[in-house]
Structure formats: structure tokens, C-alpha cells
């Protein structure tokens, strides 16, 4: 580092010039009061003339400017990897006495403090400490960058937390909706099941009530022929009724209250009795051995209207029953119709 050794007392220069140089007269420096005009830089090529009896004023101004720059902003640090530059500073005590106006310049007075200032505790900062302003500015910049990074991280964390909370709320809402939908589906299924059960119960009650007014035509029987059964034995090509096989003379009962609309011989059907219900449905009782009713007679459920026989086109004794809703010629399955009245075959 540079060493600031005290300059010798100025008592004038010797008139022994170096080779090629003009001598300088001895004597003390003359007083110089810098003004705006005197410190204004001279543009263009110029030569600074040496002042009689001391240093050139331009050199002094340059030195004062350097000192002011050092005091105002510090010495810029060297770029990384380059060794520090050693700077030698002149002793400012000699300049202080000859240039009292320099003490009033910004950043210069601190380097020209006298002993009284030192005694009061104010001392110029050593050269090695110069540039701490830049270090402090760098530390402040680093702190500000770190603060910005922390602020951004906090914002990112807050955003992530908000997104997580939103996703959790959405998931909870979806689960609640699914649970609600499942509960509604179960309730609908239970309601439908209850309605079906109630409907079945009502139908059973209805059939039970109907069964009180309907009955099977024969008490003891065997089903030997069903509706729609194909075969060449029938002129239509299929069986048109339901056969109850029973021994000859077995009583035939009225299935429901009705009116006798026919009672007599019917060709292939043998002796046939037709009962017409209040809704217009005709019940045909065929192949009887005998008939106990006549046309226009009113009968009630369970009345004996004839007896099982083997008259007409038959192969054995049985009751051939046909059901014709509305008196139509085609007819329906008697087994289905009987079950619809609450009867079991």
C-alpha cells in the first residue's frame, strides 16, 4: 500500500535545473484563489505553464480533484482476478497551509483535518477502508434481491396453497355430489321397490277379493290339453281351450255369476253351455254328459251347471273350457284368464 510520508518544509527550490530544463526561482508559493473561470477546463491542445516559485496550479487543481473524487465516492475496486493497484498519495499537510480554500471543497476537507480535529475524535478514514460505500450498496442490493425472492416465494406458496384448497374444495364438492346422487338413487330405488311391493300387495288383495266370487269349474282334475297346442285333431290346427280331465259325471260349477245364453248340442263340442258375464265375456263349457241349466237362467258362483262327459269330438271324458272376451270368435288362454281372477291351477 501507499505510504503517506510527510513532505519536507517548503523553503524554495534550488536553481539547479535538470538537463534540458529551465531553472525555477526560489521562493514560497503565491496565494491562489480558484474561481469558476480559473477551474474551468481548457479545451483543445494546450500547455500548462509552470508557476513561478512552486507547483503548477493545474497540477494542484488535478490533485485536489483526485482527493475530492476519492472522498466523495471511494476508489473503485479492481475487477476480479486483477491485483490491487498501489497508489501513493502526497502529504496533504503542506497543501493545507498553502491552499486554505481547498478545505472548503466537498470531499477534501476531511483529508486535511488538523491536530485539533484529530483530538476531537474526527479522523480521515484510511485508504484501505475506501470503497465501503460500494460494499454497503452491494449488500443492500443483495438484501433487496433476497427480499424480492422471499416475496415471490411467499406469493408462489400462497398461490399453491390456494390452488390446493380449491382442489380440495372441488374434490369435496364432487364427493358430496356423488354421495348425494347415490343417496337419491338409493331412495328412488327404495321408493320404486316400495311402490312395486305395494302394487303387488294391492293386486294380491284384489285377486283375493275376486277369488271370493270366482272358482275353478272342476274340484278334482288333471290338465291334459293347453291353449295353442298344435295338432291335427283340431279343425283350426291348434287347441283353442283348456282341458280338465275328470271322470264322467264329475260336477261342473259356474265360475262366476252370469246368465245362460246357450245350452245344447254344438257338433264337435258335444253338449255345450255358454255363460255370459256382466262385462260380455263368454265362458264355453263343452263335451258335457248332461246339462242342468237353460237359456236365460241366472247362475251364481259355484252353481252346478252340468257334468263331465265325452260327447262330441273327444278321446276321453274331460271338460273343454274356452274364454271369449266380448264374445269374439278367437278366444284367449283360459289359464291366464283364471289366474287373473285370483285362481291357481
Image (cartoon, rainbow, N blue to C red):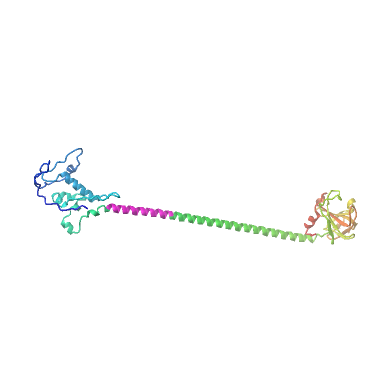
Residue 271 place in picture, x, y as percent: 90, 54
Give the residue at x 51% y 56%: 169
Q: Does the magenta-highlighted stretch encompass residue 202?
A: no
Q: Is residue 207 above or below residue 16?
A: below
Front residue of 111 and 337:
111
Q: Position of residue 33 (x, y in %)?
A: 14, 46
| Residue drawn at point x = 46 percent, y = 54 percent | 160
Q: Is residue 203 above or below residue 78?
A: below
Q: Position of residue 86 (x, y in %)?
A: 22, 50
Q: Judge from the rendering whether residue 227 lies leftward or rightward of residue 129; answer left or right.
A: right
Residue with the most extreme top position: 44
Q: What residue span does the magenta drawing correspond to?
A: 133-156
Describe residue 243's horizontal placement relative to residue 151 as left or right. Answer: right
- What secondary structure prevails in the magenta region? helix
**Quarter of the image with the C terminus in it:** bottom right
Image spot of residue 161 (x, y percent):
46, 56
Left or right for 318, reference 128? right
Q: Residue at x 53, y 56 (%)?
A: 171
Q: Is residue 143 magenta?
A: yes
Q: Residue 16: which quarter of the image?
A: top left
In depth, the one of 110 and 280 nearer the eye is: 110
Total marks shown come to: 0
The quadrant in which residue 19 appears is top left
Amino acid at each position: 500500500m501507499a505510504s503517506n510520508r510527510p513532505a519536507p518544509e517548503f523553503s524554495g527550490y534550488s536553481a539547479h535545473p535538470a538537463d534540458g530544463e529551465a531553472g525555477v526561482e526560489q521562493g514560497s508559493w503565491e496565494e491562489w484563489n480558484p474561481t469558476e473561470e480559473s477551474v474551468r477546463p481548457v479545451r483543445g491542445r494546450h500547455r500548462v505553464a509552470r508557476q513561478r516559485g512552486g507547483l503548477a496550479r493545474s497540477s494542484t487543481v488535478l490533485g485536489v480533484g483526485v482527493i475530492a473524487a476519492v472522498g466523495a465516492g471511494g476508489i473503485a475496486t479492481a475487477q476480479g482476478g486483477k491485483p490491487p493497484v498501489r497508489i501513493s498519495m502526497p502529504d496533504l499537510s503542506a497543501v493545507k497551509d498553502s491552499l486554505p480554500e481547498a478545505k472548503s471543497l466537498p470531499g477534501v476537507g476531511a483529508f486535511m483535518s488538523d491536530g485539533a480535529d484529530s483530538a476531537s475524535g474526527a479522523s480521515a478514514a484510511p485508504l484501505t477502508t475506501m470503497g465501503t460505500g460500494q460494499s454497503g450498496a452491494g449488500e443492500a442490493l443483495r438484501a433487496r434481491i433476497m427480499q424480492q425472492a422471499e416475496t415471490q416465494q411467499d406469493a408462489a406458496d400462497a398461490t399453491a396453497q390456494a390452488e390446493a384448497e380449491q382442489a380440495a374444495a372441488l374434490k369435496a364438492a364432487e364427493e358430496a355430489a356423488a354421495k348425494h346422487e347415490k343417496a337419491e338413487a338409493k331412495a328412488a330405488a327404495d321408493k320404486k321397490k316400495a311402490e312395486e311391493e305395494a302394487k303387488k300387495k294391492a293386486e294380491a288383495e284384489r285377486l283375493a277379493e275376486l277369488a271370493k266370487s270366482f272358482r275353478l269349474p272342476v274340484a278334482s282334475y288333471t290338465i291334459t290339453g293347453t291353449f295353442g297346442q298344435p295338432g291335427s285333431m283340431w279343425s283350426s290346427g291348434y287347441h283353442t281351450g283348456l282341458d280338465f280331465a275328470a271322470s264322467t259325471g264329475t260336477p261342473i260349477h259356474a265360475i262366476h255369476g252370469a246368465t245362460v245364453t246357450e245350452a245344447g248340442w254344438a257338433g264337435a263340442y258335444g253338449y255345450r253351455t255358454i255363460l255370459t258375464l256382466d262385462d260380455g265375456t263368454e265362458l264355453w263349457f263343452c263335451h258335457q254328459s248332461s246339462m242342468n241349466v237353460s237359456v236365460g237362467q241366472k247362475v251364481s258362483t259355484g252353481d252346478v251347471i252340468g257334468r263331465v262327459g265325452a260327447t262330441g269330438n273327444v278321446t276321453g271324458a274331460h271338460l273343454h273350457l274356452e274364454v271369449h272376451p266380448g264374445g269374439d270368435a278367437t278366444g284367449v288362454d283360459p289359464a291366464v284368464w283364471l289366474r287373473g281372477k285370483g285362481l291357481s291351477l
